[in-house]
Image (cartoon, coloured by chain):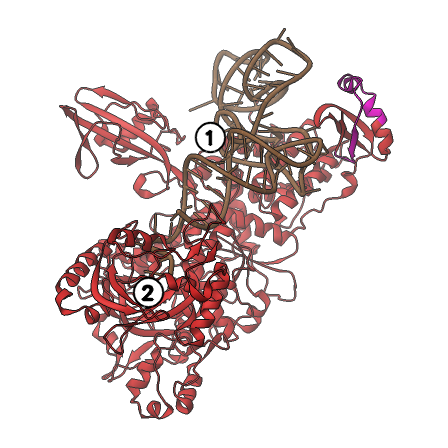
Chain colours: A red, B brown
Amino acid sequence: MKEIDYKFGEIESKWQKFWEVNKTFRTSDDMSNPKKYYILDMFPYPSGAGLHVGHPLGYVASDIFSRYKRMCGFNVLHPMGYDAFGLPAEQYALDTGVHPAKSTSDNITRYRTQLDNIGLSFDWSRQVRTDDPNYYKWTQWIFLLLYQHYYDTSEQKAVPITELILHFEKNGSNHIAAASSQHSSFSAENWNQMTDSEKNAMLMNYRLAYRKVGYVNWCEALGTVLANDEVKDSVSERGGFPVVQKEMLQWSLRITAYAERLLSGMDALQWNESLKTIQRNWIGKSEGAFIDFRIDNIPGQSIKIFTTRPDTIYGVTFMVLAPDHDLVPIITPDNRQEQVEAFAEKSKNKTTNRTGLKTTEGMWTGAYAVHPLSDENIPIWIADYVLKDYGTGAIMAVPGDDERDHAFATQHALPIVSIIDRSAFPNADMGDHEGVLQNSFLLNGLPIDEAIQKMLDYLEKYQLGIRQTEYKLRDANFSRQRYWGEPFPVYYDQNGLPNELRTSELPLELPDLDDFKPSPDGRSPLARIDSWTKPQPGIDRETDTMPGYAGSSWYFLRYMDPHNQNEFASKGAIQYWQDVDLYVGGIEHAVGHLMYSRFWHKILFDLGYVPTQEPFKKLINQGMIQGIVESILLMKERDNGYYHFVSADVATERKMDDTIISAIPVHIDFVSDYGQPDSHLTHDGLAAFIKWRPEYADAVFETKNGVFTASQFGEEMLLTKSEVGKMSKRYHNVVNPDDVISRYGADCFRMYEMFLGPIEQSKPWDTMGIEGVSKFLKKLWSLYFNEQDEWIVTSDPPKEGSLKVLHSTIKKTTEDIERFSFNTSISQFMICVNELRKLDEHSSEVLSPLTQLIAPFAPFVAEELWEALGNTNSVHTSRFPDFDDEYLIENVFTYPVCVNGKKRSEITLLKDVTNQQIEEQAKALPEIVKWLEDKPIKKVIIIPEKMINFVV
RNA sequence: GCGGGUGUGGCGAAAUUGGUAGACGCGCUAGACUUAGGAUCUAGUGCUGUGAGGCUUGGGGGUUCGAGUCCCUCCACCCGCACCA
């Protein structure tokens, strides 16, 4: 029998052209349709590596959904664009001399081809690129909005800085309710007497975008400052280069002002819990109190601490400052200065890498603080476990109810007072909010939560401390000493004061440049172009550029009205589209992009530019498609139990024991001649592998998936190991969707990616199962065409049973699509097609709706079949079929009949029989008679259309 | 350590509100058509037992006529944060 096949290659290019010519997926500008749906993919950074099979997972899912929504009559906005500014393009320029604009554009062209190959239904007329001056004009404009506003903490919103100035002129800093970098007190007179530069400096404490000298994460190797979320374990997330703290004049964004709203705003969002948790942790809210501890014998000096447990204050037996706390040199008596300094110096070196460090090291400063309630003297220590940049950099130590304080006190023989009685809670640990206070005077006998409130009231009443909510969230650094980013729309006058550009002067375009090296002093490459930095005498331009997240923090709004020259998007367009109904993307943006976007959106909301508090109503994190990481170790010689492993870069020498190092990551998939994945190295695969990496021509291989094996070949040996890991260029395991598509077709590729499992789950790429999907498409095709490629669809009435199969498929798949369960919808298609083949069904009355049903998943095949069915429009402009209950209603039902919950038989009965009839007929079944024997029936449970159960 | 999540055949996985566990696909076994099979079609396939039957959703316990699903407890793995005051 001839294999039924369809020529997917021809079909794909035919319909790609058709869609382009007919603008099939243009979003309608007609905003009268009240059913709008905005479905967005996280736009990619167009890297040099191109797309791999992992990227399309989310794209295909959102594409299926948007095709479905369109067919349901929604006006769908489904755009795509490029996050085009960023470090890698500049790094590439440094290495190769290719201008970032050029390499970025080249990459974009390549991405576009790949995306089109997959058959994604984006409205490309709305494409945005963050490096387009027409786009970043508005990025700069939004930055200026931030600069021009401050956060009013009583109104809980952004307010023009001009109102703050009015307030200062009238009242000075009295009754001010504004988020600020530092609190200062001044009168109206003081304010009015300030010089411009003093006023400017003061206002910088309040602006939402502000410039200040501060410690920043400086990465020497990258020649730039990085935001907190770009740094992990003291190395840069990109490249893994060391990051140190450096003092620099930088722009920052006051995201801390929005901490509470960013936290509470999440409650109503349909995001998955783990993502919300990541954001909550990042914001890191803690409620407690600031308390001042006077220092004995040094008038006017006090230690400010933050605590979430003010109830434990009677258990304070010592204080601890961070070793680099500002007060340390002040309070330390002369005779101890030297030792204390030495300790601080030693711990400084440790802090560069303190992850996972648990220590009880510390030293007494020689000074004493005064307990605010008992007036007792308590020693002040310094210790590594207190961090300068968390809280106030100082703690009141309560060894009686804090594990770290307890360990520290034990180590250094400091007194411990038990202040919590947990005898009623044997399972409670130190620090748990269970138990009652003891040895605590006015708090004695109170449960912890009540005691906290009572102490807070008490502290405030006697002005010993204040209630305060603290957040871990830090303001976001917004300056990069880099070329490939948005220039700041500001200039500095003779006094160095920042001045904003007018909207009419935007965009401030990035000048052309051919030397991208950062200056060794940490200044941006832009600083070298005098014509740009000093456009006029007395005017200096900012030479830093904005970070990568600037352009991506609002791009979803631009899609609503991408070509608008006068506004970032028209009021009408924003009013119509409102917000993103569904956002699909990776979880790696949890604390970066998603946090900044929400922050910017809230500011735009406060200023009346957008109608919603949150930009992304529902969010789905697609899982990662992993690759198989193969490591090969080539063993050179052996003597006295030592082997020499030759890796790509260095020869490493290791003792052969249970632990084996991985040296050269290679991937063996898709290296065999016919492109068939083959992770067990076969002879063909081996030949291809050696062709690919000729340096291994003389080696002998023996592999076994997942375990080490070795074969000996003279003095050489080769070990391999397979494991699941990231798909990445450096592991040589990137699978290009183009290869899969050319072999199986785009429809097959799309369906297979969806069939792999739930969208949100990560899974290794494995082509084993793709044949099943391919087979399904051939079977589908065979319902319409026979082996001779003849059209066999008839206008006959449907055969008995086929409408039932069709309609239950419509019902099931519609429900599955709505809940984003595409793997199960595909299963249902398979069942349906198999059934129809069994019934030898070729009626257009059945096949027409089936074609429509499959269209979102396999758009190319569906178009071809839809056309063959005699339609002139695109299947995507047709109406998604509704199921008809009439075909699903059954007048009989097969009940499982159970005895004591175990199924023993089954019985098919009419639907409208009474329970008594059901019981009698079921009881009479021979199997049931046997199981019931003569035991008395205690109870009969009949659940209509579910089951019958006899309890004996 | 804290927080979040996941545990179901040889594998990827299904299973509305507790109601026939393992749908669908891969793989495997047998057969058909074939010079051939890495094509196609048919049948079988959780484990165990000749059979009736018994066992089975990470382990243990509970609620229920009935538990993958609810409750308690323990274990394993993954992700995030991490000396967080």
Read off the residue under disc 1.
A768
Point out the tag, 2 or 1, that comes first from the N-terminus: 2
**Could you say which is closer to the camera, residue A361 or residue A2?**
A361
Task: Tell me which residue sits at (46%, 30%) in the image.
Answer: A768
Read off the residue under disc 2.
A485
**Could you say which is closer to the camera, residue A858 or residue A197?**
A197
Could you say where residue A142 lies in the image, as x and y percent from the top left?
Answer: 42, 72
A824 left or right of A320? Answer: right
Could you say where residue A126 lies in the image, as x and y percent from the top left?
Answer: 49, 62
Extent of the magenta region: A920-946
Look at the picture and state if A592 lies above or below B57: below
Residue A507 visible in rendering: no
**Residue flagged by tag 1: what amino acid is it?**
Met
Mark 1, Cα crowd under 10 Å, few <14 / some 14-19 / many 20+, is few
Q: Secondary structure at mark 1?
A: loop
**Image mark 2: chain:** A
Could you say where residue B14 lies in the image, as x and y percent from the top left?
Answer: 59, 37
**Could you say which is closer to the camera, residue A874 or residue A49?**
A49
**Image mark 1: chain:** A
Q: Could you tell me which quadrant the N terminus of chain A lies in?
A: top right
Mark 2, Cα crowd under 10 Å, few <14 / some 14-19 / many 20+, is many
Task: Tell me which residue sits at (85%, 26%) in the image.
Answer: A920
CA gap between label 2 and label 1 equals 43 Å
Could you say where residue A866 lies in the image, as x and y percent from the top left?
Answer: 64, 43
A436 left or right of A243? Answer: right
Image quarter of residue A549: bottom left
Look at the picture and state if A191 lies above or below A460: below
Give the numbered dot on residue A581: none
Look at the picture and state if A144 lies above or below A896: below
